[in-house]
Image (tube, grey):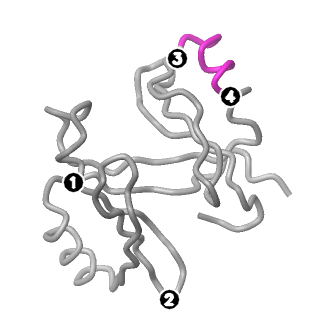
Amino acid sequence: MSNHGTIWWTELMTRDLPKALDYYAQTCGWEYEAMPDPDTGGTYQVAMKDGKPVAGLMDMSQMEQLTGIPPHWFTYIAVDDVDATVAATEAAGGEIRRPCFDVPGIGRIAIIADPTGAALGIMTPAAPTEGG
């Protein structure tokens, strides 16, 4: 079964990770599992609800390309073929903000902007039958 077009993952990019972790633990009942974040050298927090991963939270303060961008939630949509979707995005007038890359155990990902300029992540999940 294809997950093409499914909202697959979402992550909070913030400059005050401890405050965000506390807030979502209190308001959503989330617990966290920490893992290394290769992009920042810091720690990526996977929010867990009832033993299942529901979102990621990360400190964006060390990401120079995000200077001036306010804290925000970022969404990833599952696609059957990231490379084909990147080509289709360019053909439709969208923009490739970060070319395709692989994350072992997670999937193949690209960061794009649709033809209206809205940024999003697209990904072909490594385990296409299990929701993000």
Q: Quadrant of residue 42?
A: bottom left
Q: CA distance from mark 1 to mark 2?
A: 24 Å
Q: Is residue 24 above or below residue 107?
A: below
Q: Which residue is mark 1?
A: 14
| Residue located 33% across and 51% down the image | 73
Q: CA distance from mark 4 to mark 1?
A: 28 Å
Q: Residues within 10 Å of mark 4 (few under 14, many from 20)?
A: some
Q: Main secondary structure of the magenta part?
A: helix
| Residue located 33% across and 86% down the image | 29
Amino acid residing under circle 3: Gly
Q: Which residue is mark 3?
A: 94
Q: Which residue is mark 2?
A: 50
For marks 1 and 3 on the same chain, the one whose residue lies earlier in the sequence: 1
**Residue 62 relative to residue 87: left or right:** left
Q: CA distance from mark 2 to mark 4?
A: 33 Å
For marks 3 and 4 on the same chain, the one whose residue lies earlier in the sequence: 4
Residue range of the region highlighted in magenta in the rendering: 86-93
Q: CA distance from mark 3 to mark 4?
A: 11 Å
**Residue 117 relative to residue 59: left or right:** right
For marks 2 and 4 on the same chain, the one whose residue lies earlier in the sequence: 2
Looking at the rendered structure, the secondary structure element under dot 4 is helix
Q: CA distance from mark 3 to mark 2?
A: 38 Å
For marks 4 and 1 on the same chain, the one whose residue lies earlier in the sequence: 1
x and y percent of residue 2 in the render? 81, 52
For marks 1 and 2 on the same chain, the one whose residue lies earlier in the sequence: 1
Looking at the rendered structure, the secondary structure element under dot 1 is strand
Furthest-bottom residue in this view: 50
Q: Residues within 10 Å of mark 1 (few under 14, many from 20)?
A: some
